[in-house]
Image (spheres, rainbow, N blue to C red):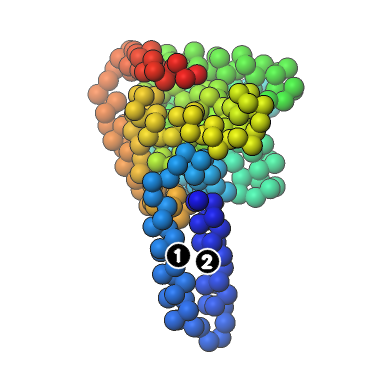
Amino acid sequence: MVKEIDARINEIDKEIEDIKSKEVVDEAQIYVLKRERHDLVKMCKNLDPHDKVFLARHKKRPKITEYIDAIFDDFFEQKGDALGKEDGSIFGGIATFDGMPVTVIGHRKGNDLAENLACNFGMPGPEGYRKALRLMKQAEKFGRPIITFIDTPGAYPGIEAETNGQSQAIATNLAKMSALKVPVIAIVTGEGSSGGALAIGVANSVLMLENAVYSILSPEGYATILWKDSTRSDEACSMMKLTAQDLKDFHVIDEIIPEPIGGAHLNPKLVYKVVEKYIRRELAKYSKMGPDELAKHRYKKFRTIDSDYLNLL
C-alpha cells in the first residue's frame, strides 16, 4: 500500500512544482493537490511489516551524513583501517554534541547511483569494520561516548571480503564492543541486516526509528533460504519480526523513536530534532555510570535478550 501512496505523493510534488514554475500560478489547483497529498499521508498509519521495509529502504530516507550535519558540531572525518585501505561504506569521526567530544560512526549510503557505487550501497567490507573498531578504541582511550547509526543491507558478501577476513572483522567488533568502557548508543535509522549491522550495534542503548527494520538477513534472503523463492519476501517480512515494535516487545531494542506519518523522508528536520533529544537523554543517563559499570551493563543487556526472539532465529 505505502509504495503506491509514495509514488502518487511524488507525482503530486512534481505537479505542484510545474504549476509554480508557470507565469500564472493556479493557486486553486495547488490547494486541491495539497489536500490530496495530505489525505494520502494520513493513510500511512498502521503499516504492515512489508510497508516498513519499503520505508526503511526509501532512497530519500535521511543518511548518516545528514544526521551528522544536523545534530553534531565540528565533525572531523577519520579514514582508513590502519592497514592501508579506506572503505567508504563506513563513515566516522570525531564531533561535539552539546560541547562534549563524541565519536560518531555509521553505515553510509548514497543519494544517487554514483554515490551508492562509491560506498558500495552501504555494505562494508572487513576494512570498514576495522576502521570502525579503530575509531571505537580511540574513543575509549580518550573517554569519548560513541554514537553509531545503523543502515545497511548487510556486510559485503563478495569473495574478496571473505578472503580479507570479513567474518573475523565482524566477530572482533562484537567482542571488543561488548567490553568498551565508554557509553555506546546505537540508532537503527533504516535497514539493519545481519552481522553487518550488529558489528557496530553492540550498545548500551539500541534505539530504532519507528519505520526502521532490524533482522538477521534481508526478507528476500530469508524467503530464498526457507522457500527457495525470493518473491515471497512480503510473507517473510511478517514472519521475521523485524519491525521496531516487534523488537521492542522482545527486548532486543530499548526505545522506538517516532517518525512523521509517511516516513522520515517527509520531514527530515523533525526527525533530526527527535533523534537529538533521544541521544541527549541517553548520554545523560550513562554519564552517571563508571567505566566498568558501562561494560557490565552492555554485557548483561545482550545476555538477557528475550529467549522467545532467539528461538525465531
Rendering coords of residue 270 (x, y %): 37, 52
In the picture, measured across the screen, residue 251 lies left or right of residue 109, that is left
Dot 2: what SS? helix
Residue 15 sits above or below residue 226 on the image: below
Amino acid type of the residue that numbered disc 2 sits on in the rendered structure: Asp
Dot 1: what SS? helix
- Residue 32, by quadrant, is bottom left
What is the number of the mark on residue 13?
2
Give yes or no for contact between labels 1 and 2 (Cβ–Cβ under 8 Å).
yes
Residue 272 sits above or below residue 83 on the image: below
Rendering coords of residue 141 (x, y %): 44, 19
Amino acid type of the residue that numbered disc 1 sits on in the rendered structure: Arg
Residue beneath disc 1: 37
Name the residue located 55 percent from the left edge and 22 percent from the top edge: 195
- Count of marks overlaid on the render: 2
What is the number of the mark on residue 274?
none
Outermost residue toward the bottom?
Answer: 24
Crowd class of label 2 (few under 14; some 14 to 19; many from 20; radius 10 Å): some
Outermost residue toward the left?
Answer: 288
Rendering coords of residue 219 (x, y %): 57, 32
Residue 210 sits above or below residue 79 on the image: below
Name the residue located 32 percent from the left edge and 38 percent from the top edge: 278
Name the residue located 56 percent from the left edge and 68 percent from the top edge: 14
Q: Nearer the viewer, mark 1 or mark 2?
A: 1
Please state which of residues 54 and 226 is positioned toward the viewer in this rendering.
226
Crowd class of label 1 (few under 14; some 14 to 19; many from 20; radius 10 Å): some
Rendering coords of residue 218 (x, y %): 58, 31
Name the residue located 31 percent from the left edge and 42 percent from the top edge: 277
